[in-house]
Every structure is written in structure tokens, then in C-alpha cells.
């Protein structure tokens, strides 16, 4: 694929370090990112616009002025997840997640990637990922060295033409190579229905999907601007521990209308199956469009489920053959640190376990609505 110099990914680098906060090496981070990009194949296709001492009143102006594909914030975050910008007198001005989420909703047709290189920013990152395709945030406190090493390697990999997922993993690898104990802190959040393995820097300029390309080809051939989506149902497999059978059955009932309408088929894998049932399980797992993982302590502790259901599902996901969505049934220690599926976008949103909701049915309706978005995306891609 030929790439022209007019195909530019614009990075808006927003830096803020109010006078009451610890001084950060923001200039070093900015310079390091530029240097790492300059080493890369597609260096001419990246442009960094740097804005310093950013005030809360500047955000709308800067977004309107630059219309960036990547919004990068470098600075401080609070323990409760707010980003700290500056006031008129360089005082502290915390910005809540809901505010940034609203901002990015307005500019989501421009910005496709948001990087929050600040402590405790994963709370905001997960919220913004409801509006923006890809968001990186930090799960905990992170030092200057870790933040700079991680994000510089990320941008370098992206400018070499790697996918966003691969670039994120290279950033993690850089921390491990440098022996910086922070590899668990950066988190990548993906808007439901998308795959970070399928998006590189070109996607940030002009997002495309197989379905849109096919529709364009049909329109050119027939002179029509409309097309029919496929009637083939999307196949869903629910992977769960036997102890969560009651939850599985209740959740599946909420999919009844979609099943009756022919939008989906749904099957549940039972880890205790034997004989011919194992063959059936393998068949369904190997043909599923969506695999729902019902995460609980019993689910996570089962080696059989991990090796025979989770691992094959993740393998298919990495090949672009299926979507894998964790559903947090109950509070489960360290599930999000799991190397196979811990970084996937989970439901319900904000990773609030269903057991923590006052009304379990409301939680399940929220889950089904988000899964429906993924189903619609798959049907469009298959059209």
C-alpha cells in the first residue's frame, strides 16, 4: 500500500503540571516521543502539536483548532481518577471522567485514540472508551521513567506500521526490557465491537471495515446506495463454571427476543461435559462469532475451563475469527491481571460486577444492550 505524505496522523500533546503538584518531566516525554517516531518507517505521517500548561478552559478551543486523531494527555491524575489541569493562576483544576467523556463524544469523529499518561487514569480511560475507539490509561501510580519508556515505545511501534494492540504490547515489553516494575499499570480499552489487532495508524485517519468496502463495491455495480444485511444468525457461546449455572440461565433468557428473531444462536459450554459432548463443545467454540466469559472465582480457578475454553477462544480472537467479552459475575480478585483476557473490554461497564448491582436484571439488560452492538457490527461486516 502506497502512503502519501498528506496522510497525516495528528497527535495533540496536552501537558499540565500546576504549581501545587510534583514537577514532571513533560518536556522529556514530548522529546522522547518525537525521537522514537523519527526512527520509524512512517515518521513523515505523524505530526505532534504540543500545548503546555493546559487550562480547563482551553480544551474545547484546542480540540476545535487542531482536530487531532490522537489526543495525548501528560500530567497528573488524582486517586479517584480525575485528570488535573490548570486554572487561570496555575492552580489545581481536577476534571472528572464524565466531563472528558462528554468532550470526546463531541469530537469522536476526529479522535480515534486517546492516551491518558497520568496516574490512576484507567477509570477515565474506560469511560472514554464508550465514545472513542481506543483509549490507554494507567491503572495505578506511574513514575516518569515508566511513563516515558512505555509511551515512546508505543508510538515508535505505531509509526512502524504495527497495530494498536501490538504497539501497546511493545510498550509493555519495553518496561520489561528496562526492568521497570510497571508492566501491569498501562491498560488498553477498546470500544465494543472493535478489535485493536485490526487497526493501525491508517485506521486513525480513515476508519474502514470490510462491510463498508463491500457496500461501496455493490453500490458501484448496481447504482444503489443501499444494501441488505445478512440474515445469517450470529453464533454466541457462553463459557462459565457449573457453579454459575443459575446466572447463565438468567442471562440467556435476556437474549430470547434476539434468538427468536433469528439474529443469534446461543449455546453454553459446560466444563463437566464428557464423551460426545466434548466434540460438540469443540465444534461450537471453533465456530463461535462471540464468546462470553462469565467471570467468577469458580470460573477463574478452573484449569479445565482455562485451557479448553478460554485459551482456544483467545487464539481465535487473535486471528480475527471471533470476539471475546468477559462478563463480571461477581467480585473476583485479579481477573483483570490475567495475561489471556484481563485487558479485554468487560461488561458491565466500569467493570462493576453484576453482584454489586442493586437490581441484577438491570445489569443484565445493560450487558445485552452492549452485546447487541457487537452483534450488529458483526452482521454488518458479514453483509
Image: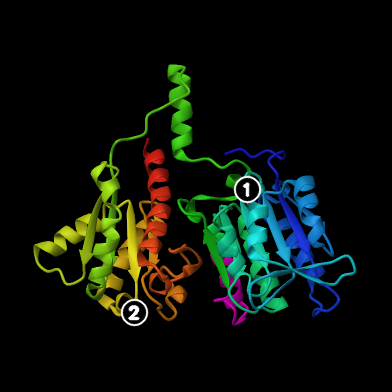
Secondary structure at badge 1 equals loop
Front-most of 248 and 221? 248
Q: Residues within 10 Å of mark 2 (few under 14, many from 20)?
A: some
Q: Residue at x 66, y 76 (%)?
A: 146
Q: Residue at x 69, y 56 (%)?
A: 71
Q: Quadrant of the N terminus?
A: top right
Residue 155 is at least partly visible in this image: no
Pointer 2 or 1: first along the chain:
1
CA–CA distance between discs 2 and 1?
Answer: 37 Å
- Is 211 placed left or right of 99 in the picture? left
Quadrant housing residue 380: top left
Quadrant housing residue 127: bottom right
User: Where is mark 1, residue-wise?
Assistant: 108
Residue extending furthest toward the right: 89
Secondary structure at badge 2 equals helix
Where 166 sits versus 383, above or below?
below
- Is 382 placed left or right of 274 in the picture? right
Percent coordinates x, y for residue 135 in the rendering: 59, 60
Give me the disc on residue 297: 2
- Is 236 placed left or right of 79 in the picture? left
Q: Residue at x 36, y 67 (%)?
A: 360
Q: Residues within 10 Å of mark 1 (few under 14, many from 20)?
A: some
Percent coordinates x, y for residue 303 in the rendering: 28, 77
**CB-based contact (under 8 Å), mark 2 and mark 1:** no
Where 57 sits versus 1, above or below?
below
Front-most of 365 and 244? 365
Percent coordinates x, y for residue 274 in the rendering: 12, 69
Quadrant housing residue 330: bottom left
Residue 301 is at least partly visible in this image: yes
Residue extending furthest toward the top: 223
Bounds of the magenta segment? 168-185
The number of callouts visible is 2
Amino acid at each position: 500500500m502506497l502512503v502519501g505524505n498528506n496522510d497525516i496522523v495528528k497527535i495533540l500533546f496536552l501537558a499540565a503540571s500546576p504549581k501545587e503538584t510534583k514537577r514532571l518531566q513533560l518536556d522529556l516525554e514530548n522529546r522522547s516521543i518525537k525521537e522514537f517516531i523519527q526512527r520509524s518507517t512512517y515518521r513523515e505521517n505523524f505530526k505532534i502539536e504540543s500545548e503546555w500548561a493546559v487550562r480547563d478552559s482551553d480544551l474545547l478551543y484546542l480540540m476545535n483548532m487542531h482536530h487531532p486523531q490522537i489526543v495525548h494527555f501528560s500530567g497528573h491524575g488524582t486517586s479517584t481518577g480525575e485528570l488535573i489541569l490548570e486554572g487561570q493562576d496555575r492552580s489545581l483544576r481536577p476534571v472528572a471522567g464524565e466531563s472528558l467523556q462528554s468532550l470526546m463524544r463531541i469530537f469522536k469523529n476526529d479522535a480515534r485514540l486517546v492516551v491518558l499518561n497520568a496516574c490512576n487514569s484507567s477509570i477515565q480511560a474506560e469511560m472514554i472508551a464508550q465514545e472513542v475507539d481506543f483509549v490507554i490509561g494507567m491503572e495505578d501510580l506511574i513514575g516518569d521513567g515508566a511513563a516515558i519508556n512505555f509511551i515512546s515505545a508505543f508510538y515508535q511501534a505505531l509509526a512502524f506500521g504495527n497495530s494498536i494492540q501490538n504497539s501497546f504490547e511493545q510498550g509493555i515489553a519495553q518496561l520489561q526490557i528496562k526492568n521497570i516494575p510497571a508492566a501491569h499499570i498501562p491498560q488498553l480499552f477498546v470500544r465494543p465491537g472493535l478489535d485493536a489487532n485490526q487497526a493501525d495508524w491508517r485506521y486513525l485517519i480513515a476508519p474502514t471495515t470490510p462491510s463498508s468496502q463491500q457496500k461501496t463495491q455493490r453500490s458501484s455495480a448496481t447504482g444503489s446506495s443501499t444494501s441488505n444485511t445478512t440474515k445469517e444468525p450470529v453464533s454466541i457461546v457462553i463459557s462459565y463454571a457449573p457453579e454459575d449455572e443459575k446466572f447463565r440461565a438468567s442471562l440467556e433468557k435476556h437474549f430470547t427476543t434476539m434468538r427468536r428473531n433469528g439474529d443469534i444462536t446461543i449455546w453454553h459450554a459446560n466444563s463437566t461435559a464428557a464423551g460426545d459432548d466434548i466434540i460438540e463443545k469443540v465444534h461450537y467454540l471453533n465456530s463461535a462469532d462471540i464468546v462470553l466469559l462469565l467471570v467468577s472465582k469458580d470460573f477463574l480457578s478452573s484449569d479445565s475451563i482455562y485451557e479448553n475454553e478460554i485459551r482456544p477462544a483467545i487464539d481465535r480472537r487473535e486471528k480475527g475469527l471471533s470476539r471475546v467479552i468477559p462478563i463480571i459475575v461477581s467480585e473476583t480478585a485479579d481477573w483483570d491481571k490475567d495475561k489471556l483476557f484481563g485487558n479485554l473490554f468487560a461488561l458491565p461497564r466500569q467493570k462493576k460486577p453484576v453482584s454489586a448491582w442493586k437490581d441484577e436484571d438491570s445489569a443484565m439488560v445493560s450487558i445485552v444492550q452492549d452485546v447487541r452492538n457487537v452483534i450488529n457490527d458483526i452482521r454488518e461486516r458479514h453483509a
